[in-house]
Amino acid sequence: MQEKITQEEFKNIVHRRQREMFGERYVGANLGTIDAPEWAQIKISEFMHKKQHFLVWCGNKGIGKTHLGSALVDWAIKNFNSYRKHKESDLQKKVRAAMGEEKGDYFDYLKYEIDDDLLMIDDIGRDGWTPFREELLIETVDQRYNSMKPTIFTSNLSRADFEEKYHERIADRLFAKENFIIETMDLISKRQ
């Protein structure tokens, strides 16, 4: 029999996971603290209710994309058996390290890192384009797209940037009509 936990205990669990996944700055983030246009908040809500496909938020730095991921931790705990967040650059480093340690196919390790019920890949393209980064992104997008598992992608790149800089399969799947797309390239950083 599973023991009920108090609201305070649950809040502490959420804060611990926010700290582990996003850092101290994002502890306490919740849906009420997301400062996004109303239409974007509707897209987020629709994604949360559907619990499949992609939520893709493209926008300038400092507008709350990572904050959204932290705000969704309590929802993730309540709705999924497993959830994980990676910065794209950190995922690349983990896969490269695994390639050095093991003499196998790195796709097996990548699959382990991205096979959770809910996944967030933050800051796509922040560190620029390389063939290896593109290969990892293609594989990640393909696996998540084919499984129809809910996935959140954030980037400072616009849809046009993805279409110009990356393999056409990436933009085709990221911006597929069944996904929830938020593009806010005109918002100003809240850090300014």
Image: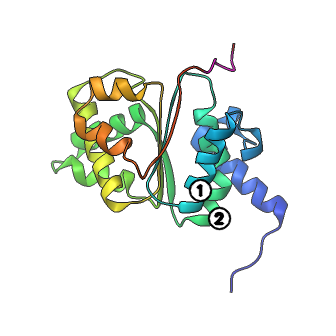
Residue at which label 1 appears: 48
- Mark 1 Cα shell of 10 Å, populated few (<14), some (14-19), many (≥20): some
Residue at position x 69%, y 12% from top?
Answer: 192
Marks 1/2: CA distance? 12 Å
Going from the N terminus, do you reach mark 1 or mark 2 first? Answer: 1
In the image, 45 versus 3, the foreground residue is 45
Residue at position x 28%, y 32% from top?
Answer: 133
Residue at position x 72%, y 46% from top?
Answer: 31
Q: Is residue 140 above or below residue 57?
A: below
- Mark 2 Cα shell of 10 Å, populated few (<14), some (14-19), many (≥20): few
Q: Is residue 97 at least partly visible in the picture?
A: no
Inspect the image, locate mark 2, and give the three-letter code of the amino acid beneath it.
Answer: Lys
Q: Could you say which disc has been placed on residue 78 in the image?
A: 2
Spot occupied by residue 179 in the image (x, y as percentages of width and height): 44, 49
The quarter holding residue 148 reads: bottom left
Q: Is residue 62 above or below residue 74?
A: above
Q: Which quarter of the rendering shows the N terminus?
A: bottom right
As helix, strand or loop, the secondary structure at mark 1 comes to helix
Inspect the image, locate mark 1, and give the three-letter code of the amino acid beneath it.
Answer: Met
Spot occupied by residue 91 in the image (x, y as percentages of width and height): 38, 39
* Residue segment shown in magenta: 187-191
